[in-house]
Image (cartoon, rainbow, N blue to C red):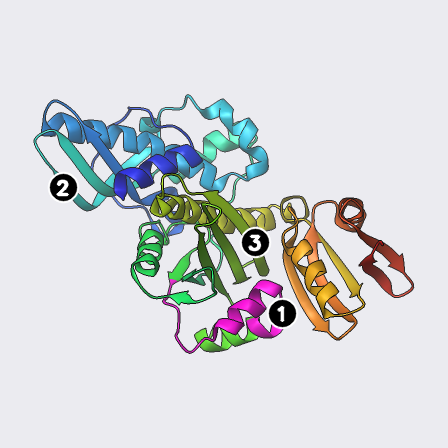
Amino acid sequence: MGLRLAKILCAVLLGAGALGSAVTAHAAPADEVYTVGNYPVDAQAANAVAAKKKALAEGQQAAFHSLLKRIVPVTDYERLKRLASLKSSDFFEGVSVRSERNSRTRYIASLDFSFRADSVRAVLQQEGLRYVEEQAREIIVVPVVRDAKGTIDTGPAARGWTDIWKSLDLEHTLAPIDLQRFKPQIHPDTIKMLLKGQGDAERILAGEYKNAHVVLALAEPDAATKRLHVTLIGADAVGPINLKRSYRVFDGDTGYAMELGAVIAQGILEGRWKAFKTGATAAANGMPVALQAQYAGLAEWSQMRELLLGLPGIEDMRIEAESAHSANLTLRFPGGAEALASVLSTRGLALENGAGGFVLRSAY
């Protein structure tokens, strides 16, 4: 898993280069986010010494770029490219080993790379780049695997999904995570309610974990479409979250898709916190919209709800109340109600400003 995860991290963040050397050191507690922990490295060379040197150098450079993308808001990533030529050795503080193994020509390890906070801050300020270094409050993340029938998986797939999350840096991230197991007393219907955005389910989840900030990381392999669906549902440090992403499964390798899904899911949690701290929540996560859906019957409401949940850009959808012919809900959408109305009009739904607020109904 280490080599594949390293490739995923490099692909999602930035490519690795070979620079720098390593000595043992630890970051000060106040500079927690300037350590990139549990970072996988894997290199081959003519001998064991050369392989280790190569792995440390490449890992250090890749971890440094990961750090920059950790603390800089995604809206500034384009400007961040100007720093691509920076040498990690100019900012490097030290490295500690979590685990390692080697052969005569290969070195594999999980390492914590620490960088000098003051030096990193200075270069970002010099370039006029915004950055966030304050960590969010710790949230609980519960990895869950569910099959096509809605049954909770407790076998190898579930253990693999949990192990993938354990392999991430859950401590130094901007959005610290307390990873916990799925509690069997949570009924599958609670997950269905969460996916539908029903607020009662959030309260059930909070009650079971004795914490208001709980996020289910729901992985759903779909053999028919050769995709893995990953949904983050619950409440993180920013607020309610209901985000779904899908990943193509190549050659039946669901494990690789899961690794990619977990890396991106953690990036989403960090991104929401960065957007919140930089005041860019509306741009990054959409603007709030409150509306009442009106329908002839529950079958029509089911179709309407599924369309909303699957609409790109819809986030944090919550159903506050529902009856046989109407439902009150809140959500976030880039551009707010006006933009949402424009998109829905192409899908057979009309969002109009009524006397009591926005009303959603069939356009036919």
- The three-letter amino acid code for the residue at tag 1 is Gln
Regarding residue 24, the answer to whether it shows in the image is no
Going by the image, does 38 lie left or right of 339? left
Front-most of 30 and 33? Answer: 33
Which label number is shown at residue 198? 1
Q: Quadrant of residue 47?
A: top left
Q: Quadrant of residue 342?
A: top right
Front-most of 252 and 212? Answer: 252
The Cα–Cα distance between marks 2 and 3, rounded to whole angstroms, is: 38 Å
> Which span of residues is magenta-colored?
179-201
Residue 275 image position (x, y, % from top left): 59, 47
Going by the image, does 16 lie left or right of 217? left
Q: Residues within 10 Å of mark 3 (few under 14, many from 20)?
A: many
Q: Residue furthest right?
A: 355
Q: Relative to 103, does residue 100 appear above or below in the rendering? A: below
Task: Give the residue displayed 17% in from the left and 31% down from the top.
Answer: 52
| Residue labelled with disc 2 | 101
Task: Give the residue displayed 64% in from the left and 56% down from the top.
Answer: 309
- The three-letter amino acid code for the residue at tag 3 is Leu
Which label number is shown at residue 243? 3
The Cα–Cα distance between marks 2 and 1, rounded to whole angstroms, is: 48 Å
Label 3, secondary structure: give it.
strand
- The three-letter amino acid code for the residue at tag 2 is Arg
Label 1, secondary structure: give it.
loop
Mark found first going from the N terminus, 2 or 3: 2
